[in-house]
Amino acid sequence: MKPAIPLLQVKDLAKFYGNRVGCEQVSFNLYPGEVLCVAGESGSGKSTLLNTLAFHQRPDAGSIRYDLREEGVTDLATLPDARLRELWRTDWGFVRQNPADGLRMRVSAGANIGERLMAVGDRHYGDIRGVAKDWLQRVEIDETRLDDAPSSFSGGMRQRLQIARNLVTEPRLVFMDEPTAGLDVSVQARFLDLLRRLVAELRIAVILVTHDLAVARLLAHRLIVMRHGRIVETGLTDQLLDDPQHPYTQLLVSSVLNA
Amino acid sequence: MSVQDGYNFAYLDEQTKRMIRRALLKAVAIPGYQVPFGSREMPLPYGWGTGGIQVTASLIGADDVLKVIDQGADDTTNAVNIRSFFRKVTGVATTEQTREATLIQTRHRIPETPLAAGQILVFQVPIPEPLRWLEPREAETRTMHALREYGVMHVKLYEDIARHGRIATTYDYPVIVNDHYLMRPSPIPKFDNPKLHRNPALMLFGAGREKRVYAVPPYTDVRSLDFDDHPFAIERWEQPCALCAATDSYLDEIILDDAGNRMFVCSDTEYCAGRQAAGHKGALAA
């Protein structure tokens, strides 16, 4: 195997809200197909980090370099807006905690899945519909629901539809912000199974924010633990959860039963 | 009729007219781009054509011949009032003949009689932004226009086909102007969309409440959005106009009684009257 180039290289990243720290001194590399979990209590800067990584907000310091399909490794700060937005809707995905924020609730499931295809220039209704139908099956939604609006879907279905909508352009990197937080436990398990399968099949790199260490245990290859906007500990998921070194991580792990 | 005392020619003051003309020049220079302008209060409510009236007022000169139509008709309330307004404040000649007019203000139709080079068609626009249905943020829609990110517009058309089996949008049908800007052609029926394409006349669009003007200069490419397997098509009727027997014009359906009887007649009254005068006779013609 040839040595892989990191898909995403983050160096000394910081984001401030006035005098307050959103996150700072964040550095890590993410490799293709790798699932990285960012854990920490609420207010620890997880979501700030995720939004900054996805360049939804500009970082105040540090750099994010991404291995673009055409240009190769590029500093995102130098990327023109047009290319950045293209990245958002093709090679990247962003799954939100609340599916209503990530979906168009008033148009059909088919149109939701097809939106990215139409955005990159697909103009054949039959083809778009075919792909949408295929993706509904892949996320285990009955294809008869193709023309139904997501507002008539259950929470779990909405979240799976959001996954399909993001994966339809076969992105290489998907950001997820607490995708399971709004789901009840039985639905969560099924959703995590599906996610794990899709991510492995398509070799998608994922940065997933969660406060739930069980989710991290199930999905993540690597884990980052954050507190007060900084990384306190990082390592392989099992290693870190079984043998936490930092006092805060120890606290976090011990506060969960059988993580 | 003499010009009303105490009012400037064409109601607006000269500085305002100049400001609107500057905006219009920019609009002509960038076909389909929505140019903001300082819309004024007009002596009629928003929704009655304040945008179109301001555009007309800023362009009209003493030699112009004005025609005003509302849904194709010269004799409906909106048309009659706007025409008499301009007669009062300018004293210019008015006409119902499309060919004689130099300036045509229209609400929701393009005349059936082909327009000629040198004529100006002014549209009244309620909502200029075609992406508003999909994206409520103005800053975002402007960026989308700048970067030509119009894929979402097809989401609306997709939704039409998914629900109705065909593109059910029948008026205000979105178009791409000059291969760049997505534009709402104001609520004209899609029947009129092909007339926008490479039309020899200058077409100006004014939205008074939304404070925007935009333009399609003469001979500009205007393409209606569609899907490869659901191409753009205009409305068709199974019968000709009941008065003038025209088969090539946009027909209005008129309910005649409680028994379900109806007739189809040209929405363009001038075109219909012209054909009748030339001897064409429909099924219900007197």
Image (spheres, grey):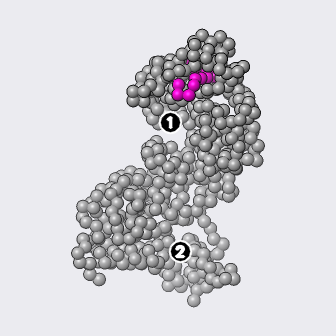
Residue B61 vs B93, above or below: the answer is above
**Quadrant, the N terminus of chain B:** bottom left
Q: Which mark is residue B196?
A: none
Relative side of A234 to A110, left or right: left
Residue occupying the point 66% across, 32% down: A180
**Which residue in the structure is indicated by mark 1?**
A85
Q: Which mark is residue B267?
A: 2
Which chain letter matches label 1? A
Pinpoint residue A202: horizontal percent, then vertical percent.
Answer: 68, 27
Residue B4 vs A8, above or below: the answer is below
Relative side of B4 to B156, left or right: left
Q: Amino acid at mark 2?
A: Ser
Residue occupying the point 43% across, 69% down: B48
Which chain letter matches label 2? B
Q: Is residue B147 magenta?
A: no
Residue A125 vs A192, above or below: the answer is below
Q: Amino acid at mark 1?
A: Arg
Residue occupying the point 75% across, 37% down: A140
Q: Is residue A43 magenta?
A: yes
Mark 2: which secondary structure? loop
Residue positioned most to the left: B6
Q: Which stretch appears magenta?
A: A29-44
